[in-house]
């Protein structure tokens, strides 16, 4: 059996409709206060989520609590934004539109927790051992420069930051990002490098 969780109930509702299964129990949960008893799971897996925990150390402690002895915690984090080309080009291009207060969500949050030494220290402090880090480098492809520009500018919380600065400039920001991707990678299809870390810790 799998207990699948997310902080956002709407995401849980959407996933449960797409992937109904008697082997999966869907529920809303906060990683910093997991609604499970001690030593319940053989493994905990988190897909690009730990970067969003307000208190990563607390979430790691909760994960350690709900794992059985010998259980494994597997998660991933993005490397620094400079190693993820589409995201980096978009952030640089849009930042130029708002030089006084650039929208840096992507650099600050998804790509802001790439220090694996710091992460390992937090895991050890939470009681984990046997921490391993694997670097995974891939390429990201898109049919045209417009696709990643639209995804980052309008499909992530970067959109909220752009609109907070000037709600009338969202399309302009998206167009500028697309132009910057085209200038660097061509008219498309486009291919950019991306890199992340997969981290495994044992209870």
Image (cartoon, grey):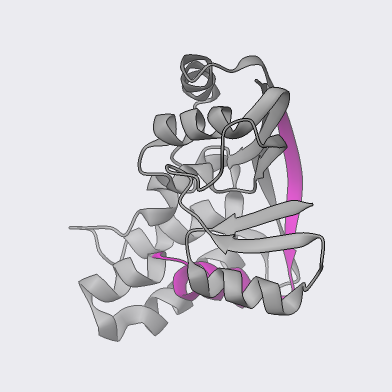
As drawn, 17 above or below 35: below
Image position, residue 128 (x, y; %): 59, 18
Question: In the displayed image of the protein, which residue is found farthest to the front?
Answer: 37
Q: Residue at x 68, y 67 (%)?
A: 186
Residue 109, placed above or below residue 202: below
In the image: residue 164, left or right of residue 160: left
Q: In front here: 40 or 60?
A: 40
Question: Which quadrant of the figure contains the C terminus?
Answer: top right
From this viewpoint, is residue 14 visible?
Answer: yes
Q: What residue do we see at 48% from left, 16% from top?
A: 121
- Residue interval drawn in magenta: 134-157
- Location of residue 44 by image quarter: top right
Q: Residue at x 52, y 18 (%)?
A: 117
Give coordinates of residue 146: x percent, y percent: 59, 77
In this view, which residue lies farthest toward the left?
A: 100
| Magenta stretch contains residue 136 | yes
Q: Is residue 199 magenta?
A: no
**Along the line of sight, the residue nearer the viewer: 71 or 138:** 71
Q: Is residue 124 left or right of residue 140?
A: left
Residue under the point 29% across and 76% down: 163
Residue 60 location in percent, x, y? 50, 31
Query: Does the rendering let one see residue 178?
Result: no
Give percent across and percent down for residue 177.
48, 69
């Amino acid at each position: 059996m799998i207990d699948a969780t997310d902080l956002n109930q709407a995401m849980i509702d959407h996933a449960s409709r797409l992937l109904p299964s008697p082997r999966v129990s869907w529920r809303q949960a906060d990683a910093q206060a997991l609604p499970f008893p001690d030593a319940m799971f053989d493994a905990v897996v988190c897909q690009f989520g730990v970067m969003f925990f307000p208190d990563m150390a607390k979430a790691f402690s909760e994960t350690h609590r709900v794992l059985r002895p010998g259980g494994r915690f597997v998660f991933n984090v993005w490397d620094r934004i400079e190693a993820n080309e589409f995201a980096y080009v978009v952030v640089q291009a849009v930042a130029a539109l708002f030089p006084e207060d650039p929208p840096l969500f992507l650099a600050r949050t998804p790509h802001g927790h790439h220090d694996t030494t710091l992460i390992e220290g937090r895991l050890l402090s939470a009681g984990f051992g046997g921490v391993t880090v694997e670097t995974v480098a891939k390429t990201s492809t898109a049919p045209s420069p417009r696709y990643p520009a639209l995804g980052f500018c309008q499909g992530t919380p970067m959109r909220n930051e752009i609109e907070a600065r000037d709600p009338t400039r969202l399309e302009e920001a998206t167009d500028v990002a697309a132009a910057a991707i085209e200038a660097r990678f061509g008219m498309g299809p486009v291919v950019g490098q991306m890199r992340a870390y997969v981290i495994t810790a044992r209870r």
